[in-house]
Structure formats: structure tokens, C-alpha cells
Amino acid sequence: MNTVDTIVALATPAGSGAIAVIRLSGKDAKSIAGSYFRSIHGKDLSKQKSHTIHLGHIIDGDVLMDEVLLSIFNGPNSYTGEDVIEISCHGSPYIQQQIIQLFLRNGCRMAEAGEFTLRAFLNGKLDLSQAEAVADLIASENETTHQIAIQQMRGGFSNEIKLLRDELMNFASLIELELDFAEEDVEFADRLKFQDLILRIQNVLKKLIDSFAVGNVIKKGIPVAIVGEPNVGKSTLLNALLNEEKAIVSDIAGTTRDAIEDEIAIGGIGFRFIDTAGIRDTKDIVENIGIKKTFEKIEQSQVVLFLHSAEEFQNAEISLTSLQNEVGKISTKHPNKPLVIIVNKIDILNNKERQQLETLLSNIEGTTYKLISAKTGESVEDVKNMLLNFVNTGALRNNETIVTNTRHYDALLKALEEIQKVQHGMDNHLSGDLLAIDIRQALHHFGEITGEITSDDLLGNIFANFCIGK
């Protein structure tokens, strides 16, 4: 990618709108834009101060294209670190394309995906983890993913890594210095302080690595499978949770033939609910395919809502033993998945029947249960709160760093492995030259996170996932 060219792209979503923003970046951004911008006050664009906005027209020869607001950001005090021009025009797709094509014909080229942020990274405006957080911020769909992305973009994660790297670098320098005086048998690096540092780095790395378990599911949305026999109210529960008619509700058994998914935010965390086909013996080929998919969705889910109808208990169709057996089958196959028994349609029960049902369910050891009416909405909010309790939000509440990026997670694992090798070397009194090899490797993996160590392939993979214009 040529980073010397002046680039242009639409910075707002494609399509019609009130306004659109067209962004230029590069050494010729001001001169190219100035050639076709006419200030209503006759201002010379090249003489205007940075961070100012000017009203005028974009004119191509005798053709007036649009009345616009033009913003100036002189490098290095801009997003990319280069001269940046942003043009706010009217949101007609025709106007957007006419202005962009005008600049493409006269010295600009179309920006690649993520090229503005890539230039910000290359010009030292952002480190690599902050640049990746920009993409996460754009993709955030709830309060929690937004909060994590903002914290990372502001340098919370990278600052933590930089501090560890700097301290490790200082000790590495002292150990390397010892190698120059190997014959004199001197130690410049205080081994007790170095031991404390290694233990502290291991603790921080383990904490960050452990946070990925929470961060990864938060970023992707926590999948929750709603399973049970036909006609127990799975689709009605999905509609109640989403507060919309997403799934078809019918008294006919086997209505849901395929998994239906949708996502909502509960307490700022995304949950992806999956309404599955009812589990039963059937000769219907299509329904059997749906039932097979149900078991696949259970495998993919983080939480299972096992739905029953109060009618089963009212008519004595299900006993404590049969319920324990059903729960046991799922728990044995998926021992680490939270399983919640949901008894639906309790609006048909009287108070005595409800109490008897509560007593029955309380005898199933180690199982969480809830009585609800998806039809009337009774206790549906309690189900949402119950799901929220399955997510470890302690780190979120304490504003701790949470790792959500798989690349960062991989680099942290490798860094921890090298630090543990250093620990092993110190425990066995290995020489400084052998310790230095493992320390350099740990420093390498730290540098991969912040971008002090990169490759063209790595940058290509990261920024290819950005939208054009950012």
C-alpha cells in the first residue's frame, strides 16, 4: 500500500441521508480540495488555520456541485497525522459520488479499507491495539462492548503492556550488559528485584488471559439455546424476551422447523437467543432435520434454557424421576453449561399447584429453575436477570482491562510461556545469556500487541477488516 498518496473516501455510511462526510488525507489534501472549493467569503484555503470550518461551494469548472462545510486539520494534529480535509455535503448518493470522482480525477486515489487508521498507526497517533479498538468501537452494539472498546482505544490495555515491557526491557539491558563482562563475573541486574518483576508479570498476564473468557463471549454475544418438547412455549418465550413477534406461535406441534436467532442487550451485555425445533420422535423428515439442528445449537450455546409446560405437571405427564433423567442427559453431555429449567404457562395453575411445583423442582439437586408465563410476561424479566448472573461482570464493574481480541490473547499466551521459561531458568541458576534469549522472545510478543513489532501481512490482515473511510 502506497502511504505517500493523497487518499479520499466516504467516511459516512453509503446511501441517502441528511449529510455525508468525504475525507481526504495526505500532503496534497489541502491543495486538491482548495482547487475546487470556493469560500463564500473569498478565503484562501491554504492560509486558513487548522481545526477551522468554512462554508462554501464545490465547483468543477462552471458546474456548482453542492454547498458544503469544509473542515481543516493540519498534520500532525489530525487523526492520521497528515493534513486532513473533511467535506460535509448533502447526503445524496449522486452528490457524494460526483465530489469523490472529482478528487479521484485530480490527484487523489481511493482509500483502501482502514487506510486512514493505518496511517494514524504508522504516524504514531495510535498503537496497534488502539487501532484495532477503533474497529471494535464501530462494531459495538451494546453498552459493554462500547465500554471495553473505549477503554482500549484510550490506551488502557496498551499502557498496561507497555509498562511491563519497559520494566522487562530495563532488566534485559542489564543482563545483556553482564554478557560483556562475563569474564569478570559481575551482576548488574539485581536478581531479587528481577524475580519480583517476573512474578508480577506472570500474575498480570494470567489475569489478562483469564479475562478473555469473559471478553470473547461479550464481544460475540452470549448464545442461549431455548430447548424442549413441541408446544411448551419456546417461540412464545423468544418473542417475550425480544418483545416482538419474531417466531411463529401456533398450537400445532412442530411449527418451528429451524433455529430462529435474535439478539438483545441485557444489562449492557449482548445475548443471542436461539429458538430451536421441539425435541420429539417424529417421522417428518423436515422436522427431524430441525431436531438435529437443535442438538447442534445446544453444543454451540453458553447457556441452555430447558423449557417445560405447566400442563405436563398438572396432568401428571412428568414426574420428578423423569425430569431428573432429562436434566441428567443434558448435564452429562454438557457438564460445563449452565442449565435452567423454565416451567412455562403457570398462568393456568392455582396457588396450591404452584407451591407443589416449586417443591418438586427444589428437589432436583444443583439445578436452577424458574416459573414463568411467557404469554402474560410474568417473571420473564427474572429470566433475563438470571442470565445476567451467569456472566462474570465483576471485572466490568471494577473497570478492569478485559481482552476481547484473539490476536492479543494468542500473543499473551506466548509471552507467558516465555516468562515462565525465564522463571524456570532463574530457579535453576541458568546463565545470563540463556535468560536473555527467553526475555527477548517475551519482549517480542509484547511488541506484537502494541505494534512495535509488525509485518506487512499482519497489518494487511488487521486493516482489511475495517470499513473504507476509517
Image (cartoon, helix red, strand yellow):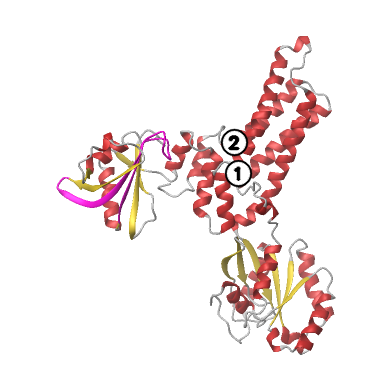
Mark 2 in CB contact with mark 1 (< 8 angstroms) = yes
- Residue 89 - label: none
The earlier-in-sequence mark between 2 and 1 is: 1
Residue 200 in magenta stretch: no
Magenta span includes 79 = yes
Say which residue appears at 68% left-offset and 38% top-offset.
414
Residue 313 relative to residue 245: left or right: right
Secondary structure beneath label 2: helix
The image's mark for residue 407 is: 1
**Residue 257 visible in the picture:** no
> What is the distance, in whole Å, between disc 2 and disc 1 at their CAs?
9 Å
Residue on which disc 2 sits: 448
In this rendering, the answer to whether 330 lies above or below 216 is: below
Q: Quadrant of the N terminus?
A: top left
The residue positioned 82% from the left and 68% from the top of the image is 366
Sort mark 1 into few (<14), some (14-19) or many (20+) by Cα contacts within 10 Å.
few
Q: Which residues are magenta?
A: 61-90
Q: Looking at numbered disc 2 in the image, what kind of residue is underneath it?
A: Glu
Residue 94 percent location from the top left of the image: 27, 56
Q: Residue at x 69, y 19 (%)?
A: 176
